[in-house]
Amino acid sequence: MIGGAPRLGSSAVGYLDAAATAPLRPEARAAMIDALDDGAANASSVHQPGHRARSRIDAARSDIATAFAARPSEVIFTSGGTEANNLAIIGLALANPRGRHLVTTPIEHPSVIESCRYLERVFGFSLDFAEVDEVGRVSASSVAALVRSDTALVSVGLANAEVGTVQDLPRIAQIVHASGVLLHTDAVQAAASLPVRFGSATFGVSGAAWPGPGIDAMTIAGHKFGGPQGTGALLVRSGLAVEPLLHGGGQEQGRRAGTENGPALAGFAAAVRAASAEIGSQGVALIESREALIERVLAEVPGARLTGDRAERLPGHASFVVDGVSGESLLVALDAAGFAVSSGSACAAGSDDPSPVLLALGFSAELAQTGIRFTLAGPVTAAAIDRIIEVLRAETASAAHRRGSWNGSQ
């Protein structure tokens, strides 16, 4: 039971936390079972089972490269998005020593910011943060103002996990490359729901033919596509050196040591294939549900405000602050009703600190603790939205009553 309600599987309508991890796709599960049933083998072994394991990994690498208009040699498998971001920031900055200056934004995933901080602390790099506006957009001009002759790397995420805003990477890339600086993007949140391409193809929320982003490195993670957790990849432009974080064997062309998890990588590739095939139709359905939810919340939940860009946002992403009620209490109330969501505040992870992302967008510390995020794995029914609104209204009314009682007692 979840708070007295029937437990809902991750594929059920009550699972609205796909940005944290997407439900495992049946295609991924089948691919992993097939690989496991083939028996144990190390892909570095020279016997026939080893050759089959190697062929499976090569096929996974080729499939993922194809999905993102990349070359197989540009795909470095990792244990997930966090490792891939660390490898991108640290590995590229150390292996391509143009200088010791980094540029990123204050709304990046902690694995990006902390990798930059590591280079500051251990290697003496300096770090600047490009400003974001009230909806989480970073302008190309704000990045350009920070790029210097000694800038080694710029890292700007394609889409923000907390507020869903999608960045104008093509324009940012033009500015960065004109200065001869490397550009990395964390595409973990975007790649599973937008037509993202690492090569010369296009991407865009509306499907418009944007110019190619011209990025040098891009991070993806398997479990955002409905693949297994613990899988990811860093796509690195051909010819760029990468200083390995893990040393030992010669796996991943010497860029990431360690025996590959062949069955998991097979599931990763199967999930990417399935997600890529349905991005267009699924995106339309997600946007319809997202907009229905946003309109109802803004119209019917007192004190609710949308966070992030209303138009240029991830298809299935709806995030809010709700004045006067904590994000954690909303999360708990929805959980009790059978809906799995995330709080926009770090209090969801056991901290009382306000969300750094919402603070960067200009929200007060008090309001930044009220964030809540709905991220859809599939379309949501009208009945489910009705129930969500009912729960949110009840919780906001209860919070208002508690405040009134407290004030009356003073």
Image (spheres, rainbow, N blue to C red):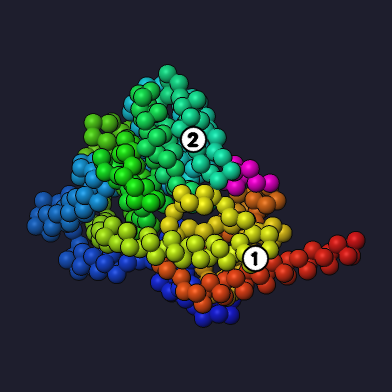
In the picture, measured across the screen, residue 8 lies left or right of residue 363, that is left
Which residues are drawn in magenta? 356-364
Rendering coords of residue 128 (x, y %): 52, 29
Badge 1 marks a residue whose secondary structure is: loop
Coordinates of residue 280 in the picture (x, y in percent): 32, 59
Report x, y in % for residue 30. 25, 69
One can see residue 309 in this view: yes
Mark drawn on residue 139? 2
Q: Is residue 361 magenta?
A: yes
User: Crowdedness of circle 2 by 10 Å Cα count: few (<14), some, many (20+)?
Assistant: some
Image point (68%, 59%), residue name:
303
* Residue 32 found in image quarter: bottom left
Q: Amino acid at mark 1?
A: Val
Quick check: 192 left or right of 269?
Answer: right
Q: CA distance from mark 1 to mark 2?
A: 32 Å
Quarter of the C terminus within the rendering: bottom right
Residue at 69% x, 66% y: name it.
396
* Proximity of marks 1 and 2: CB atoms separated by less than 8 Å: no
Total number of numbered discs in the rendering: 2
Q: Nearer the viewer, residue 101 or 260?
A: 101
The residue that mark 1 highlights is 301
- Residue 238 position in % (x across, y down): 23, 34
338 shown above or below 326: below
Q: Give me the residue at 57% from left, 66% from top.
A: 296
At 55% from the left edge and 35% from the top edge, which residue is drawn?
Answer: 131
State yes or no: residue 162 in magenta: no
The vertical placement of 32 against 88, above or below, is below
Dot 1 crowding, Cα within 10 Å, few <14, some 14–19, many 20+:
many
The residue nearer to you, when weighing 236 against 204, is: 204
Q: Does label 1 or label 2 sit earlier along the sequence? A: 2
Q: What amino acid does circle 2 point to?
A: Ser
Secondary structure found at label 2? loop
